[in-house]
Amino acid sequence: MMLNNELKKNPFNVPNNYFDSLPSKVQDRCITVKKSPISGFIPKLAWTGGIMVLVLALFLSYMNFNNTSIKEQQNPDSRTVDADINDMVPEFAGSHKDYLKSHRDAVVDYLVVRNVNLNDYLASKY
Amino acid sequence: MLKDNSYTDRELMTMFRNPAQKNYAFNLITRKYQERVYWHIRKIVISHDDADDLVQNTFLKAWEGLESFREESQLFTWLYRIATNEALTFLRKKRTKFFIPMVDVENQLSNTLESDAYFGGDEMQLKLQQALLRLPEKQRLVFNMKYFEEMKYEEISTVLGTSVGALKASYHHAVEKIEKFLQED
C-alpha cells in the first residue's frame, strides 16, 4: 500500500457545531485573561542583562529542536547556522544554564508569541 | 457586510489596531484561521479534547501578542508557530508528567486513536496515523504540513525555522518510512 490521494482525506471529526462556538469560547477567555506573567518577567531580566542570556540559550534550544532531523540528514545549509549559534552560546550562557532550563517554557512562549526575529535582535545589539 | 474570511490579513490588522474594532477584528481572525489551526494541532496531539484546549491557548496567546505582530510575517504562519509550540510543549509535559520515554506517549496516542469517538477514518487511514506516530516528532510535523495541508516548503520553513533543503529531506525520509510501514502485514 502506497500513499495516495485517498489517504489525504481528513480522518478526524469534531463535535457538531464545534467551529461555530469556538470563537466565542476564545473571546470569553480573552476578556478574562489577566496580564501575562511573561510581560513582567522579561523586562525585569532585561534590567539585569539576563534577557540576552535567555534569548540566546533558548534560541540554541530551539535550533537544536529544529535541527534534530537536519543532523540526521547531514544537510550543510543549516549546519552553518547551527554551528554559529553553538559558538556563540557558551560565551553568554555560562552559569545561567540551570536557570534558563527552569524557565524554558516562559521564554519560548515569549519568543514565539512576540514573533521575535533573533537574527535582527542580535544584529541590533552586537 | 463582507463575509468573515473575505478580509485580508492587512485589513484585519488595521481593524485590530483600532480600539473600537479590536474585539471584533480578533473574532474575525479567529473565525478565519480556527479550522486550520485546530486541524494542525489535532494531527499532533490526536485527541479532540486536548486539541480544543490547545487551540484556545493558541488564540489566547495570539491575542496577547498581536499588538506586536510584525506584518512582514504572514499571520497564519505566526499562528502556526504558536500552535506548533503549544502542541509540542503539551506532549513534552505529558512525557515529563508520567516519567515515560518518548515512544510510550506516541504508543498511547496510537491506542487512543482506535477508541476515539471523533476518529472516523477507515483501516488504512488508521494505519497511516499509526505510522505517523512512529516517526520522529519533526518528521511527523513536516509530513502533516506537506501531505495533508499541502503547504509550500517555504511556508513550512517559516513555521519551523528550518531550511527548505532540510525539509525536503525530512519529508522524503518520512514518506519512505510510512510506505514501508503501510506495506507491512
Image (cartoon, rainbow, N blue to C red):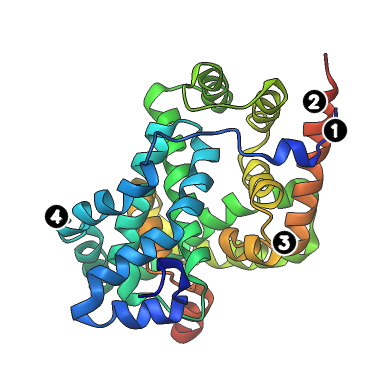
* Crowd rating for badge 1 (residues with CA inside 10 Å; few <14, some 14–19, many 20+): few
- A28 with respect to A88 (left or right): left
Question: What distance separates the C-alpha of mark 1 from that of mark 3?
Answer: 32 Å
Instruction: Give the residue at mark 4.
Output: A32
* Crowd rating for badge 2 (residues with CA inside 10 Å; few <14, some 14–19, many 20+): some
- Tell which tag, 1 or 3, sits nearer the viewer: 1
Residue at figure coordinates x 55%, y 68% from the top left: A88
Residue A79, numbered label: 3
Q: Which image quarter is the C terminus of chain B in? A: top right
Asked where in the image residue B152 lies, by quadrant, the reply is bottom right
Q: Chain of mark 3?
A: A
The percent position of residue B122, horizontal first and vertical second, equals 66, 23
Task: Using the rendered image of the protein, determine whether residue B25 is visible from the camera's viewpoint.
Answer: yes
- Tell which tag, 3 or 2, sits nearer the viewer: 2
- A2 with respect to B21 (left or right): right
- A25 with respect to A125 (left or right): left
For marks 1 and 4, the one nearer the N-term is 1
Q: Which image quarter is the N terminus of chain B in? A: bottom left
Amino acid type at image mark 3? Arg
Instruction: Give the residue at mark 1.
Output: A2
Mark 3, secondary structure of its residue: helix
B57 lies above or below B111: below
